[in-house]
Image (cartoon, helix red, strand yellow):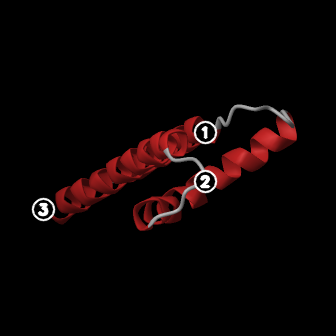
């Protein structure tokens, strides 16, 4: 019972992070450079996930105008999800 509840909570957390990343990407296209309370809140959740991807991208492909960090963040979330749910 507890493991089912924990699995559900973790599943919701992973889904929330994925939706937050998508929202951050869309908002960066719609309102680039504009800060408001909603974008700042979303950025608080997504930046720790996307920063490693940005660092990796800068090292491998410096000066690339496209930001692939959301894709890298999705891959990281998927790997962590697989590890966590294999343990549970």
Determine crowd level at label 2: few under 14, some 14-19, many 20+ residues with C-alpha closer than 10 A. few
The C terminus, quarter of image: bottom left
Could you give the CA–CA distance between mark 3 and mark 2, rounded to whole angstroms? 46 Å
Determine crowd level at label 3: few under 14, some 14-19, many 20+ residues with C-alpha closer than 10 A. few
Residue 64 on image: x %, y %: 80, 32
Q: Nearer the viewer, residue 1 or 72?
A: 72
Residue 58 on image: x %, y %: 82, 42
Q: Secondary structure at mark 2?
A: loop
Q: Quadrant of residue 3?
A: bottom left
Query: Image point 70% across, 31% down: which residue?
Result: 66
Q: Nearer the viewer, residue 64 or 9?
A: 64
Q: Earlier in the sequence, mark 2 or mark 1?
A: 2
Q: Earlier in the sequence, mark 1 or mark 3?
A: 3
Which numbered marker is on residue 1? 3
Query: Image point 67% across, 37% down: which residue?
Result: 67
Left of 83 or right of it: where is 66?
right
Q: Nearer the viewer, residue 15 or 47?
A: 47
Which numbered marker is on residue 4? none
| Pointer 2 residue | 33
Q: Earlier in the sequence, mark 3 or mark 2?
A: 3
Query: Image point 58% across, 47% down: which residue?
Result: 32
Which numbered marker is on residue 72? 1
> Of the residues tagged 1 and 3, which is closer to the observer?
1
Residue 47 on image: x %, y %: 58, 58
Q: Secondary structure at mark 1?
A: helix
Determine crowd level at label 1: few under 14, some 14-19, many 20+ residues with C-alpha closer than 10 A. some
């Amino acid at each position: 019972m507890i493991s089912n509840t924990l699995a559900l909570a973790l599943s919701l957390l992973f889904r929330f992070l994925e939706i937050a990343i998508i929202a951050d990407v869309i908002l960066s296209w719609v309102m680039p450079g504009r800060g408001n309370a909603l974008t700042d809140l979303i950025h608080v959740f997504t930046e720790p996930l996307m920063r490693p991807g940005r660092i990796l991208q800068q090292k491998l492909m410096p000066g690339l105008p496209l930001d692939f960090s959301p894709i890298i963040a999705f891959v990281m979330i998927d790997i962590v999800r697989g590890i966590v749910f294999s343990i549970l």
